[in-house]
Image (cartoon, helix red, strand yellow):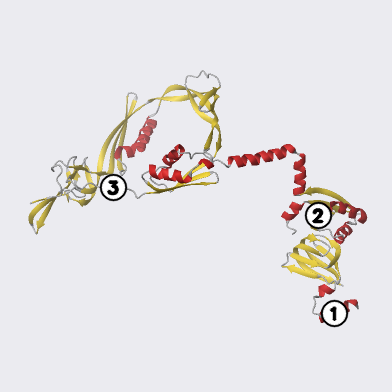
Amino acid sequence: MFSPVWNYLKGYVIIKASGLSAGKFINMTSYYGINLWDIKNDGKAYYIKADIKDADELKEISRKSGCRTEVIKYKGLPVLIRKIKKRKAYALGAFIFAALLYFLSGFVWTVKVEGNYRVPAEDIKQFCRQNGIYPGALKKNIEQADAAELIIANFKDISWASVSVRGTEAVISVAETIPEVKIIDNSYACDIISDMDGIIENITVISGTPLVRAGDVVKKGDVLVSGRLEIKDGEEVKGEKYVKAEAYIRAQTVHKLILKVNLNQKIKQYTGRSTKKAEIWLLGKKIEIGFDTGYNNYDKELFSDFSLKIGDYKAPFSIKVYSINEYETVTKRITENQAEKKARDYLEAEEEELFGIESYVTDEKISGSVQKDSYVYTAFITVSQKIGVEDRAGYNNGTLRGENN
Amino acid sequence: MVRNIRKTFADAFELPAEAVSAMPVVTLTGQVEMIIENYGGVVEYSSEKITLATACGVLNIEGRELDIKYMNSQCVTVTGVICSFMFVE
């Protein structure tokens, strides 16, 4: 009954009562049946809260008790309504805000895809866009059941789909089919041969007869695992069987790399002159604002990007401001150390590309020399890597796992 | 004399004492809130001490950060840290 919310709804007044008869004033108010709350005393005066409807009566009691009272503030919903009534534009603004909120809530502003692993979310979103589900689409135009059926029909990897609209978000939930099993063709026979020179580190054979062991030196083209299996009865060879040789073989290989770094490098030197340029994009058209910089060489860097966005919806209007910095191309001679660092950085960056993903460098011997305007970087790199490729040359094409007695 | 008659009447009919007399009813919640019904008026009010007039004399409430949370003709609610209260006849 006397909760702060209820008091706010009814409206209340804060009164300051001071003077010698302030206590008398408080006692008289309760005697007259006026409800008071949050009575505070700061030593000089009392601060009292009372119902707004009792404000006039409180004035009368104050006069009778001889207490000096002062209305500090009127608060609560009735006061707010009175204020709003006076300020028509404020009320109109609040109404427009509410109407706009209601209007905008009738649209889908974000599209979310969940439950997909193999099918890219972008593909599903793109398909949904073609079928009327996109940021900015009217919610009432979305046929949820039809859209879900279309998704299932269009994507063969999706076995179930559901389209629902939660607030202003369209949620596309999908369940994917069981992934297709990758069929390994074992119908032919082959050997595994080395595709480079090296020293065998380890070998794990799945099928076939291993012809090398750890520590063996192999040359490119050597057979590492044979697809020929001997069928023995004790020591006596009874026959042969041809299979597809499979094995995991790692070897230490040595690679010689020669990198030439030009000591005369062309570098950008900024002149310090810069300017700003704006682009206005309106309905897919670009309007450039600015002036011709007159710079021969310059870098264009995005400085600020203003665009109107609601959720995933982008309004066809944006302003982009670019910073244009002028530079000159100058030729500068770099030191040997800098050239070596460049070469080393390049090697580190390209390591995976050069030696494959399952490889790592175990040792490297480096030498460098200056030849005219170039720095020649020579590296002997020992790499631990996977080797071996299939070779079907020794077998007839189409030979099945057959026995040849 | 009148008080005794009222008390005898209340005892005879097993009525609550506050119903037939103007006895104050004090309800204390921990040490943070005290509700006093049937009080006569506020005699003294500060953040350390509140004195109320009642039918059984004055009620002195002492504590820290004392406030009158709510007040009407029937009851008064005191909040804060109540350390002691005492009736003085």
> Is A264 or A110 nearer to us in this picture?
A110
Q: x and y percent of residue A292 in the render?
A: 53, 18
Location of mark 2 (residue): A50
Residue at the image position 82 percent from the left and 65 percent from the top:
B74
How would you rate the neighbour count of disc 2 (Cα within 10 Å): few for under 14, some for 14-19, many for 20 or more?
Answer: many
Query: Which mark is on residue B9?
Result: 1
Where does the N terminus of chain A fall, quadrant-wise? Answer: bottom right
Query: Which mark is on residue A182?
Result: 3
SS for dot 3: loop
Image-based side of A311 in relation to A147, left or right? right
User: Mark 3 or mark 2: which comes first in sequence?
Assistant: 2
> Is A250 or A108 nearer to us in this picture?
A108
- State how far apart marks 3 and 2 are (Cα): 81 Å
Q: x and y percent of residue A129 in the render?
A: 46, 38
Chain of the residue displaying label 1: B
Amino acid type, mark 3: Lys
How would you rate the neighbour count of disc 1 (Cα within 10 Å): few for under 14, some for 14-19, many for 20 or more?
Answer: some
Chain of the residue displaying label 2: A
How would you rate the neighbour count of disc 3 (Cα within 10 Å): few for under 14, some for 14-19, many for 20 or more?
Answer: few
SS for dot 2: strand
